[in-house]
Image: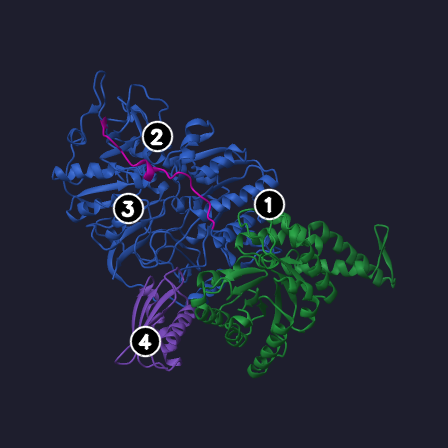
Amino acid sequence: MLFIPGNNPSMIQNSPFLGADSIILDLEDAVSLDEKDSARCLVRNALLSLDFNGCEKVVRINSISSGFGYDDIDAIARVKPDAFLIPKATEDDIEEIDSLISTIEREEGFKLGCIKLIPLIETAFGVEDVFNIIKSSKRIVAVLLGAEDLTADMGIKRTKEGEEIFYARSRIASVCAALKVDAIDTPFTDVNDFEGLRKDAEKAKLIGMSGKAAINPRQIDVINEVFSPSFDDINWAKRVIEAYEKAKMEGKGVFALDGKMVDAPILLRAKNIIEKAKAIGLIKG
Amino acid sequence: MKIVRPAKAGTMESNDIYIMVYPNENGNEIQLDSIVLKQFGNQIKKVIMDTLNELEVENALVVAKDRGALDYTIKARVETAIKRACE
Amino acid sequence: MINAVKREIPEFIEGYGKVKPFMGAYANIGDVVKTSVKIKSVKPNDKKVLPSIKDALLKCGIKDGMTISFHHHLRNGDYVLNMVLDEIAKLGIKNLTVAASSIFPCHAPLVEHIKNGVVTKIYANYMSGPVAEAVSKGLLKYPAIMHTHGGRARAIESGDLHIDIAFIAAPTCDTYGNINGVEGKSACGSLGYAIPDAMYAEKVVAITDNLVDYPACPIEISQEYVDYVVVVDEIGDPKGIVSGTTRITRDPIGLRIAKLAAQLIDEVGLLKDGFSFQTGAGGTSLAVAAFVKDIMKKKNIKGSFAAGGITGYIVDMFEEGLFKALFDVQCFDLKAVESYKNNKAHQGMSASMYGNPHNKGSVVNNLDVMILGATEVDIDFNVNVTTGSNGIIIGGSGGHSDTAAGAKLAIVVTQLTKARLPIIVDRVTTVTTPGETIDAVVTERGIAINPRRQDLLEKLKDSNLPIFTIEELKNMAEKLTGVPEKIEFEDRIVAVVEYRDGTVIDVVRQVR
């Protein structure tokens, strides 16, 4: 997921061609207070006219409490983004926003629930309450961890190694897995350190996060490499599916691959890998 | 909408357009400077005029300095400047 | 008459002569005759060093209507062309033809000489800045003739371009006229573009700011070609001659394009041992080299040669063992100059060896892959690098047409649009390089393969690369920007665009 400043036409129009899965058009931290109206109008018009090349269109609105959030939702929901990214998300915020969007969807004749929500977990309370936050709206498809604000909220130091956010990552990954939504990892802020980025992304993947946010287009390739299934994974998955198909044809309910029983969870993992590989274009879909 | 005071929107960055709006006596007027004036001058003026008409503005002088903005950007910057000029 | 790229060109052009229309990239190759050169022998005890440029001009018998030539190895730091023309103007000479291999913004004083009738005709492979604008506006009396690096060498060797006096800016020169470009405060490396001039001009004057005792080795241009030597304080500004280091682009769109181009090269099966490669010095082109380097290292590929204009980045690839040799017609930065001086397999090449279609085989003939730029590309794959879409001259082929004709895979890398201007259009404003020699266009939004290359399309049919038709790319561009209004031109021809074989591929008319 690539963050793009919402008041920058050059970056907005180029963003869909940088290899990211989702574009986050940012109306919040990337836009100064006196330009909030400008950015809102630009993003709105961009969503109406531009081809986003199949990328997910996400808009980070300003928080409800900031005063700009309501205008953002009103203006942007009506041009049907794929999702809103909600900063400093709380249960109450999410419920209120969900209901505002539902009203707009009805007014505009959109399919109810088509606009999704991604809460940004960037406070200690958010980390603790993430289960309830996700449960508070059916629109939630993913959660993004915001470690810079989180560590500020907790009064601790943010480091490249990320020991200080180990718990936050694990908790979010666990809750997301339990509630079947995506867990997206926090951005890596040193845009010149690609080794550090790779290590950080690998840590996040190991814990169970399914993607990572990028704050600079140059980070996209490394992030994609880390979170994509490897060739070995894909080949394994293909063999599992083949063995499954063969067993099905022969009327067998259970089957083995390489001397090991393949049961439902393993088959599911293989199918997910193939899905992901197709989606990224690693294999022809 | 009626223009009550000068206002501006946009930047001089590449792919953007810098719009300045002033109240005007005789209807709408556009002064355009663009890096693609020969190729797109008429199109840019059209988008600005269409946006003024959509917003029902009848007394604006729009001074525009274009650096290759696409139509959606021109529309957005004009909208923003007009709204700022009307508050 | 209509030529082979469907351009309307007259049969005769005032100030140029009878037009030989372009008939195809390989239509005009075969038996050729090299011209003979009239020279004045130098006897034992003759001295070549003269006290001033003025003396050299008088000794060479400078007259109205002559053709004088210059090379562009000092790029935008050159002082020599201006110095020589100033002296010529002071002598009251008029109606000169200037054959400069390239003209840069530093040559702005030439505009005055054009206005005053000192210079009435220009030959150049590339022009930018005030002189290019002046030519576009019709200030030059006769149409400028724009040819390619290889085509200029051809013209000189065949006699189509007869040079009366060649002025050779020499970073190092000895008292008998041996010249090299690797020593001296104005060192520029290879002097490839000056070699045809030295060999075929009637009179050759070396102008140097570093006169050394005889003999000066290595010898790039030999004493056997040089009539006189003049010493000046400075032949150029080192900051303008070579840049410190040339850099790969950091623009994410440029990097995206470069990555796609490298993947294309890999997928068509050209990245294997013996691979040969050339790229321009621009940021995106260099980025392609960077991605190609990654793939070569991963697959442990040993290339045969890299050619060009050589930059430090290519030198690095060579020194890391990725290429056996470098062919260098000009050095773009200090690292390249150093390497040219020190590495045996960093081989210089003359403009003729580089790209002359009428010799026994130029370096471009053995190129596997060439990375090219464009100001416009049309749906016939014709490329314009001569004029901007506003009709003003902003460049010229340089080696573009030569390398495109020779390379097995000629790839144009470009953004789909630049500041609201679509790069892919119905018809380019000016045809520099014909579409039959362009194999692929790579943009950030997709790749188009020339339908003439069914073999490439076949190899790519199972590819995950974003392959489109050129019309689809054009439509994508127009959908974004809108369709630009056409620039209007007068009838008057201000420049003739010659293909490398001397035929006329297009003309540039005066902008209204």
Look at label 3 and name its amino acid.
Answer: Pro
Quarter of the rendering occupied by the C terminus of chain A: bottom right
Q: Please give the chain letter of the residue carrying mark 3.
A: C
- Among the chains pictured, the one given blue colouring is C
Q: Nearer the viewer, residue A234 or A74?
A: A74
Chain B, which colour? purple
Give me the disc on residue C225: none
Magenta-span inclusion, residue A9: no
Read off the residue under disc 4.
Answer: B5
Magenta-span inclusion, residue C234: yes
Mark 1 in CB contact with mark 2 (< 8 angstroms): no
Q: Nearer the viewer, residue C435 or B64?
A: B64
Q: Main secondary structure of the magenta part?
A: loop
Q: Nearer the viewer, mark 1 or mark 3?
A: 1
Residue A189, position in %: x, y? 55, 52
Read off the residue under disc 1.
Answer: A195
Secondary structure under badge 2? Answer: loop
Q: Nearer the viewer, mark 2 or mark 4?
A: 4
How many residues crowd around disc 2 within 10 Å: few (fewer than 14), some, or many (20 or more)? many
Quarter of the rendering occupied by the N terminus of chain A: bottom right
| Residues drawn in magenta | C228-250
Q: Earlier in the sequence, mark 3 or mark 2?
A: 3
Residue displayed at 32% across by 44% down: C125
Per the model, the C-alpha gap separating discs 2 and 4 is 64 Å
Read off the residue under disc 2.
Answer: C181
Read off the residue under disc 3.
Answer: C105
Per the model, the C-alpha gap separating discs 3 and 2 is 22 Å
Q: Residue furthest front?
A: A155
